[in-house]
Image: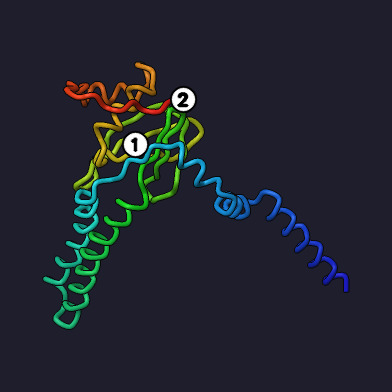
């Protein structure tokens, strides 16, 4: 009897913890309550270019195709199939998903992107401490290190609107900010011949 009561008390505590602020419940309320849509409405979206990312993912299938050359005859077809799946699935499908559904988002106050393993990351501009460039196969990234985070945000440098993103960064950030300094050093401000819309500041 006392074991049943103990189990019920533990279940009650867990349910109270879950619904009063546990991460899954917060995420559930975040999506259902429309907070996600309201937040995204005030952010600029910058989509990744399809070709560089697709090529990088597809190239990971080359080792499987190479393994088929030295594999026993009864295993060649397996390696060839794995290589083809990686080229098609990892290239075309993954590239399309990343392009359409996982843009970089930014505003005058924050940057939203992903880590190397795909975890979502939100960074306040003032929390960014350093940036460094990194080449990954057919793509280039900036590794953005921020205060209080152990892993860096991987900021793609192959956005469809790359020039527009850099222009917004220059308008949002102070001259001494590491991200603005990088863009001004690596990508001088292009000469504007036509009027372009301003970046929102709120």
- The spot of residue 86 in percent (x, y) is 24, 65
- The spot of residue 83 in percent (x, y) is 20, 68
Q: Which residue is mark 1?
A: 143
Q: Residue at x 35, y 22 (%)?
A: 171
User: Label 1 to label 2, Cα distance in Å?
Assistant: 16 Å
- The spot of residue 136 in percent (x, y) is 24, 45
Q: Nearer the viewer, mark 1 or mark 2?
A: 2
Q: Residue at x 20, y 66 (%)?
A: 64
- The spot of residue 105 in percent (x, y) is 39, 39
**Front in this rendered view, residue 195 or 135:** 195
Image quadrant occupied by the N terminus: bottom right
Task: Give the color scheme: rainbow, by chain, secondary structure or one colour.
Answer: rainbow
Q: Residue at x 79, y 67 (%)?
A: 7
**Hey, which residue is sitting farthest left in the picture?**
69
**Front in this rendered view, residue 96 or 68:** 96
User: Mark 1 or mark 2, which has the lower sequence index?
Assistant: 2
Q: Which residue is mark 2?
A: 126
Q: Tag on residue 173?
A: none
Q: Is 42 rendered above or below residue 61?
A: above
Please rate how many residues cluster around mark 1, counting C-alpha atoms within 10 Å: few if below 14, some from 14 to 19, many from 20: some
Which of the 4 image quarters holds residue 193? Answer: top left
């Amino acid at each position: 009897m006392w074991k049943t009561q103990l189990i019920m008390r533990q279940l009650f505590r867990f349910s109270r913890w879950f619904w009063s602020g546990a991460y899954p419940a917060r995420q559930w309320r975040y999506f259902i309550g429309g907070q996600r849509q309201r937040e995204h409405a005030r952010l600029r979206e910058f989509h990744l270019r399809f070709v560089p990312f697709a090529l990088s993912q597809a190239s990971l299938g080359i080792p499987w195709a190479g393994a088929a050359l030295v594999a026993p005859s009864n295993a060649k077809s397996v390696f060839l199939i794995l290589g083809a799946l990686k080229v098609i699935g990892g290239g075309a499908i993954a590239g399309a998903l990343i392009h359409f559904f996982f843009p970089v988002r930014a505003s005058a106050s924050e940057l939203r992107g992903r880590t190397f393993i795909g975890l979502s990351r939100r960074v306040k501009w003032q929390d960014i401490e350093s940036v460094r460039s990194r080449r990954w196969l057919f793509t280039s990234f900036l590794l953005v290190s921020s205060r209080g985070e152990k892993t860096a945000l991987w900021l793609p440098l192959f956005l469809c609107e790359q020039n527009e993103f850099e222009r917004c960064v220059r308008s949002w950030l102070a001259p001494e900010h590491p991200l603005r300094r990088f863009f001004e050093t690596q990508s001088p401000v292009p000469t504007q011949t036509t009027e372009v819309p301003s970046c929102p500041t709120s």
